Image (tube, coloured by chain):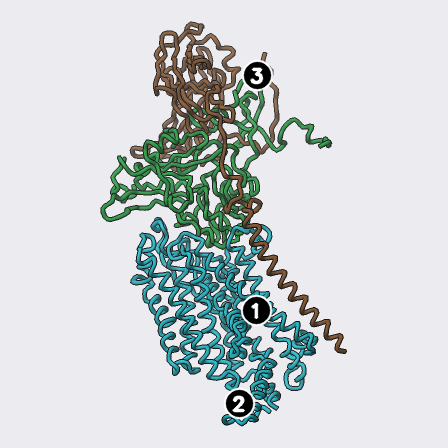
Amino acid sequence: MEYNDLSSSDPSPSRRRFFTGVFSKKENPFRSVSDETVEETGEKVQLLSVDGYVIEIDRGYLKPVPDLPVPLSLDGRKGIDGRKFVMVIDLSRCKNLKKCQTACNKMHFVGEGQNWIKVHAMKESEHTAPYWQPTTCMHCDEPPCVKVCPVDATFKRSDGVVLIDNERCIGCRFCMAACPYSTRVFNWEKPILPTAVENSGYSPETSCPPRIGTVSKCDFCPDMVRKGELPHCVSACPNGVFFFGDINEDAVTNGAETFRFHELIRDRAGFRLMEDLGTKPRVYYLPPVNRMFPFEEGLEGK
Amino acid sequence: MIQEKIYQDLLPRKFGRAGKIWVSVLLAICLVGAIAYYRQLKYGLSVTAMRDYASWGIYISNFVFFVAISLVGSLITAVLQLAQVRWSTPLTRIAEIIAVSAIIFAALIIIVDMGRPDRFINVLIYGRIQSPILWDVIVITTYLVLGVLLLYVALLPDLAIIIKHKDKIEGWVFRIARILGSFWKGTPEQVRLQQKSITILIVTIIPVALAIHTVTSWLFAMTYRPGWDSTNFGAYFVSGAFLVGAAGVVVAMYIFRKYYSLQDYITEDHFNHMGKLVVLLSLVYLYFNINEYLVPAFKMKKPEEEHLRGLFTGDFAPLFWVVILMGMIVPLIVMLFPGGRKPLPMFIAGTFIVVGAWFKRFLIVIPTLLHPFLPMSNVPENYRHYFPTWEEWAITAGSLSGALLIVTFLARIFPIVPIDETVKEKMHEEEVRLQHDYRGGGAAKQIITSTPHEAYK
Amino acid sequence: MKTTVRHSFSACLSFSMICTLGILMTGNAQDKISPRLDVAYYQMDSAVRYLGIKVRKKIGKRFEPIAGAEVRLFMEFSDETIQLGNVVSSANGEGKLPLSEEIFTGINQLDEYSFYAEISETDSLEEATEYLVIKPSRLRIVAEDSDSSISVILQTRTNGNWEPFEGAEVAVFIQRRFGKILVGEESNVTDENGAVELTFDTEIPGDGNGLLTLESAIEDNDELGNVYATTRVQWGLPLVIEDGFYKRTLWATRDKTPWWLLIFPNVMIAVVWGVIIYLIILIFKMNALSREVK
């Protein structure tokens, strides 16, 4: 292209970027920006924090981050580059505490009884052992729900995540019928939301604000993941049941422990739910052997 | 002379007292349905009893029912005409009218079921051909257009007859006929083109009719769920559709015959023929039912087991067995006997089949949804069951009334029995009879036996 | 001596270390909460330093975070105390305050840094204080490509000079987006040269070029705090993303519809609608014929 317009002479890749602090992670804030080395520049900048403090810090601490809030509609359809997210749920650690559910419901404004994460009391047959099984959206690689959507309202991203565009969904509920894991819920009535959430723009990455007459489900918290943080269920579980990670990096973590994904699946005989259906879930389970808690403890729900 | 008599009998007539009451009742039901739909638009689908497990309810089963009954247009008109069946002629118009009105309400009821009807346009803007819903949208539209064309093209000569009898009908019916059919002069070339159109239509409408109900069955069969995950589903739905459609025609035949005194045109012989046809279709449907339930029941795979036990002995068992017995087996047995193929028993059996068919669709849609693969955990008690709310019943009843209103309206403005074809056939019969008499054959049969409409002249 | 370039940033500034989610505590004077305050020192690649705070309350046997507590942080010297800044704890009770390098420029001979944190008494919280004494340290990680060996060297300042530090527990990790994967043993203790030697003998995906970030970490050390050093090595397996995501599939977006699904239904639609159009033409023909009659 011969044209040279004004914007191409602008050295910054995006004018919509602005500076913000980089610290967001407990132990090592630079882990998520591993390809950058932060150095002091000696140049000071004064910043006004959102709660009114003037702070003086070195320019080296500043890092351009994409515009907040999280990507809206069309941008949210693109996956995070080079990633293939995966979850491992360790059935040997679950005792039906439902902290995952509580955290998830709170962060996504999930309606009463419409949990995105369910904890099933499973017992395959008379003489087999009962166990607790949390289910999220399986984010299938052959997603039956996406196949049947008439309007591309639910879609799969290159990073493996299956999301919903609530601003396009027509509420036909075919995806709910198609999902063998019964993971999808429908906003039968107008969701009760705080005003700030109600008025914010919809992002498929946050699945917020939910809209009446459309479908919602577990979204793997891509807004958190984009920030380098773990999904809410993962960080909320006190027993480390949920592991989240990137299969391209061959690593999953529950926040406290990190494993090589393939080693964890190999050594602990990981499996996926309803493999025979050919849906190829991105959520793996570790069988309930060598349990941390007896099943009965979960019945008390504490 | 015969001709004039036929005109007298078959031209559109004003409603009598019963007709007015009938229309008022239907309008009242539609109004209640409209109020319920207003509430649904206002408060969302929360006014229904549908929840996250039973995510489809009677709207969808009603939709399947409408699609099913609309197939009758192609059966009676297309299949029977292609097979050169002559006795079906007086029934073609009834069948076509039922088909058109049912398919219109199939389309409407699916919009009622949508959580966001305001976004219907998204189907056109963002439509994905991968989704069976889009196939359904395309095929329903196509079938509606073909159904209307078939109704219209076959109607042309009758419209000319209406126009010719301006003095015998009200102005507005005349005006509709004039707008639609004033160009029909019955010239040989026009007749040739009309016959050609009808032939093309009946050939085209058969695959489209099979497609419409097969695609509807695929809305279910394309999922993994027990009770739906069946390669048999398309044929099962189509056979069920033909049965309910034929039964619907039987019911309509009886009512029109009685109300319009069409005993000369819709004779006991027609009921006899339709009875035999319904027996055949019942047997085919029974065959597919056995296939659909016995095969999984023999294997009793775990997810199927819960679903089938729910139907055979569980919550849905009373409804299931009533539907199977009263909606299929008892009518079948009744119609096996010549006495059962008389108008009144046929009417009763036909009504059983139609009502049974409606509940059969309920039994296809809802129990499956209430038997998911994973247990229903962490949900309120009302998520585990489904019984429609008054709004759902009202909207459903309103849609059924609406379809009947369209049938009534079309029967009001158009001849319910095709006049032109009836005249031709009667003339032909007369000719044959005269020739027969001339050759000195058996005793002359009186074709037109009674004249109950002397007063009408 | 100092050059301070002032940048005025107006509103709209998001500063994640000072979290806005602060929920002001309410309560009566008699049931004030006695907060537990923790302060930790973090140092990245010998250059970037910050203090992390954690404010919690004890409920039964568990600790729960206190949000919105204002923590003032100071650095104490023999003759003076400098206020470093204030941090308000976030929803998870945590907060971070970066330490400007200029603080350390004048004190690069000190063998110890003394930090002091305090929460003033408020309507809902009781006063709390915490001290932290840290030994200045330098951590380096050196990777040798020829034999895939990793050396970690730790020095601390003693009497104003950098000396090797013996006996600190060091771990080496491969950084991942989420979590980090251990290389070698979980704990390696520095020898008299302040060094730890490791061999990298694992196959793990890196980025597209096989680049990995190795991190040596000293965590929760009583004397040193949390000290990290990183280096980049090309020891990973180059990541090749081969998946069917961009293929034409049934679940793809409509611009990636499988060919057969584009062709056959559209052919069928074209044929049937062709017939419909032909039929409409026939109706018009019949219409036209009526004029000839006259």
Label 2, residues with CA under 10 Å away: few <14, some 14-19, many ≥20? few
**What's the residue at 42%, 58% (across, down)?**
B50
Disc 2 marks which residue? B447
In the rendered image, the quadrant that contains the C terminus of chain B is: bottom right
- Could you tell whether A189 is left or right of C262 in the image? left
Please state which of residues B348 and B381 is positioned toward the viewer in this rendering: B348
Residue extending farthest to the front is B439
Do circles 1 and 2 both sit on a common chain? yes
Provide residue B194's location: percent of width, then percent of height: 64, 73
Task: Check disc 3 and report its element: helix, strand or loop.
Answer: loop
Provide residue B131's location: percent of width, then percent of height: 51, 52
Asked if residue B398 shows in the view, the reply is no
Tell me the amino acid under the disc marked 1. Ile
Q: CA distance from mark 1 to mark 2?
A: 30 Å
- Could you tell whether A132 is left or right of B1 in the image? left
Contact, CB < 8 Å: mark 3 with mark 2?
no
**What's the residue at 53%, 48% (across, down)?**
A153
Q: Earlier in the sequence, mark 1 or mark 2?
A: 1
Provide residue C231's location: percent of width, then percent of height: 47, 18
Q: Which chain is green?
A: A
Disc 3 marks which residue? A42
Task: Check disc 1 and report its element: helix, strand or loop.
Answer: helix
Q: Which chain is brown?
A: C
**What's the residue at 54%, 49% (across, down)?**
C260
- Quarter of the figure with residue C199: top left
The relative height of residue B370 versus residue C84 in the rendered view (above or below) is: below
Q: CA distance from mark 3 to mark 2?
A: 112 Å
The relative height of residue A103 versus residue B82 in the rendered view (above or below) is: above
Nearer to us: label 3 or label 2: 2
